[in-house]
Image (spheres, helix red, strand yellow):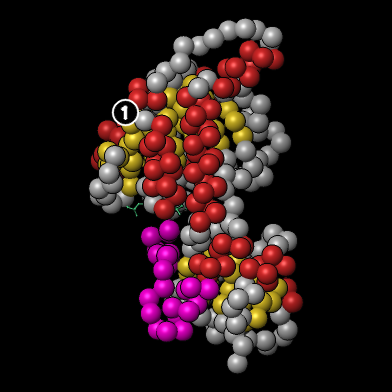
Amino acid sequence: MTEVLAIRSDFERFDEWVEAFRESDLELVRWEDLKEGQAIDYVLVWQPNPGMFDQHPEIKIIFSIGAGVDHMSGKNILPEGVPVVRMVETNLTLGMTEYVVYQVLRHHRFMPHYEQFQRDRSWKEIMQVPASRRNVGIMGMGVLGTACAQALMPFGFHLFGWSRSEKHIEGIKHYHGPEQLHAMLSHCDFLVCLLPNTRETRHILCKEHLVHLPRHAVLINAGRGSLLVEDDLLSLLENDHLSAAVLDVFEEEPLPVDSPLWNHPAITVTPHIASMTVPETSAEHIWTNIKLYRLGHPLTHVADMKRGY
Ligand code: NDP
Ligand code: OXD
């Protein structure tokens, strides 16, 4: 019997998904079009509602449309014991590396200043700083953080990483655990945050930790908005401890129109677009996992929902 993959998301990309799965033997159905009592085998979802899976104890795997799984970590959302596979795919990773490399280079080469000079019709120069005199640190050296660090390597930046567990990655000085966080932060002219939203990481970008950055550091947060204490950021910018911030994710999304972040001169706001899942390439990751499941083999990139990522 043909197996069914039901898709439920806010994005209107169903036709793209169907095209992406054309080589598979799956039947794709919009969640909204499921018939009463219709059985499904797999679900691909972003921001499921509580109770949404209650009528479907037969689901074999839940696939997250995003890399983060915090959108399904609330109470009464996930059925017991069903594996949740997070999104890991080429274009999502490439998109994040482009965003991070672009934002680091943009600030490294003082582009926000030059944009202002142009608006002021002012012919001014700022002395260039070689990349070899800059340190870039990444909080969260997982799939995305590691790819970003590797993409920054050829420019000659000194690279630092921080994660929960110990790692040895060529060319990167790696720190781990809460006790090594301040040591890592003390190096970072640029701090890139690519942590997931979990109980442990909530509000980790707060004054208590960020004051350990060198003065005039730049913060780039593309992990989750819940990681950052916005008032602490504003006060660190106010007293010049930080020189700029790039924020792609926010505690409340869309960012409310009256947020002071929108028109702060030292803050760049982007609307959670650092990277996006591309159906064409992510279908490969989903289809591979379904084939592994059919063969009884372990799945790849299964989230540990107790740990939160
Ligand atoms: P991974 O699971 O591969 O990596 C997560 C990293 O965070 C790991 O290195 C992990 O450490 C580390 N980490 C988790 N908890 C802690 C902690 N308490 N202390 C220290 N380190 C910790 O995830 P991805 O790299 O694929 O994605 C990371 C996040 O990026 C996603 O969860 C999502 O929030 C965000 N994202 C944002 C997007 C955007 O457009 N803005 C797009 C895609 C993702 P360890 O290696 O030791 O387990
Ligand atoms: C995310 C994503 O987790 O877009 O934010 O993948």
Q: Nearer the viewer, residue 48 or 67?
A: 67
Q: Which residues are magenta?
A: 287-309
Q: Position of residue 178 (x, y in %)?
A: 29, 43
Figure quadrant of residue 81: bottom left
For mark 1, what is the residue? 186
Q: Nearer the viewer, residue 149 or 142?
A: 149
In the rendered image, which quarter contains the C terminus?
bottom left
Label 1 C-beta lies within 8 Å of the nearest ligand 1 atom: no
Q: Nearer the viewer, residue 178 or 144?
A: 144
Say which amino acid is labelled 1: Ser
In the rendered image, which quarter contains the N terminus?
bottom right
Q: Position of residue 109 (x, y in %)?
A: 50, 22
Residue at 31 percent of width and 28 percent of height: 186
Question: SS class of the residue under badge 1?
Answer: loop
Judged by its main secondary structure, the magenta piece is loop
Q: Position of residue 230 (x, y in %)?
A: 53, 34
Is 57 inside the magenta-drawn segment?
no
Figure quadrant of residue 50: bottom right
Can residue 84 be seen here? The reply is yes
Crowding near the residue tagged with mark 1, few <14, some 14–19, many ≥20 C-alpha atoms within 10 Å: some
Q: Residue furthest top?
A: 123
Is residue 149 left or right of 99 when viewed as pictured?
left
Residue at 69 percent of width and 9 percent of height: 121
Is 304 inside the magenta-drawn segment?
yes
As drawn, 144 above or below 180: below
Residue at 60 percent of width and 17 percent of height: 114
Q: Position of residue 299 (x, y in %)?
A: 41, 73
As drawn, 57 above or below 173: below
As drawn, 280 above or below 62: above
Residue at 69 percent of width and 65 percent of height: 16
Can residue 207 be seen here? The reply is no
